[in-house]
Image (spheres, rainbow, N blue to C red):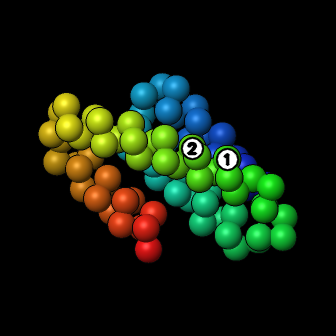
């Protein structure tokens, strides 16, 4: 249930264009969902889609702004996504 709440927060943050925060929230949703796979299997695909969307938005923000803080968040989250 907490993973779904984090996911919903991430979606709201994406709508508000708080992309770096959305990446962190979606990553938290994915981590929590993996702790209880028996309950969260049906949500995993949506969590992954939201996280990839957030990363894509963050990458485009980093390319346009070249913001150091957001670039560091993007690098960290990208490495965790593919570990």
Q: Which residue is mark 1?
A: 46
Mark 2 lies on a secondary structure that is helix
Q: Which residue is mark 2?
A: 50
Q: Residue at x 39, y 42 (%)?
A: 56
- Residue 77, position as x, y percentages in the image: 39, 59
Q: Nearer the viewer, residue 56 or 21?
A: 56
- Residue 50, position as x, y percentages in the image: 57, 44
Q: Residue at x 48, y 25 (%)?
A: 16
What is the total number of numbered labels drawn onto the structure image? 2
Q: Is residue 70 left or right of residue 56?
A: left
In the rendered image of this protein, does residue 51 appear above or below residue 31? Answer: above
Residue closest to the far top: 16
Mark 1 lies on a secondary structure that is helix
Q: Is residue 21 visible?
A: no
Q: Residue at x 20, y 38 (%)?
A: 63
Q: Is residue 72 left or right of residue 38?
A: left
In the rendered image of this protein, does residue 40 appear above or below residue 23? Answer: below
- Mark 1 to mark 2 CA distance (whole Å): 6 Å
Q: Residues within 10 Å of mark 1 (few under 14, many from 20)?
A: few
Indicate which disc residue 71 carries: none
Q: Quadrant location of the N terminus?
A: bottom right
Labels 1 & 2 near each other (Cβ < 8 A): yes
Q: Residues within 10 Å of mark 2 (few under 14, many from 20)?
A: many
Q: Is residue 10 left or right of residue 73?
A: right
Q: Quadrant location of the C terminus?
A: bottom left
Q: Is residue 38 visible?
A: yes
Q: Residue at x 60, y 66 (%)?
A: 31
């Amino acid at each position: 249930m907490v993973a779904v709440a984090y996911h919903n927060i991430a979606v709201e943050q994406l709508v508000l264009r708080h992309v770096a925060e959305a990446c962190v929230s979606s990553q938290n949703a994915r981590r929590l969902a993996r702790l209880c796979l028996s309950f969260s299997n049906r949500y995993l695909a949506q969590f992954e889609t939201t996280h990839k969307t957030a990363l894509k938005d963050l990458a485009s923000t980093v390319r346009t702004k070249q913001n150091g803080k957001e670039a560091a968040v993007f690098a960290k989250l990208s490495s965790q996504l593919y570990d």
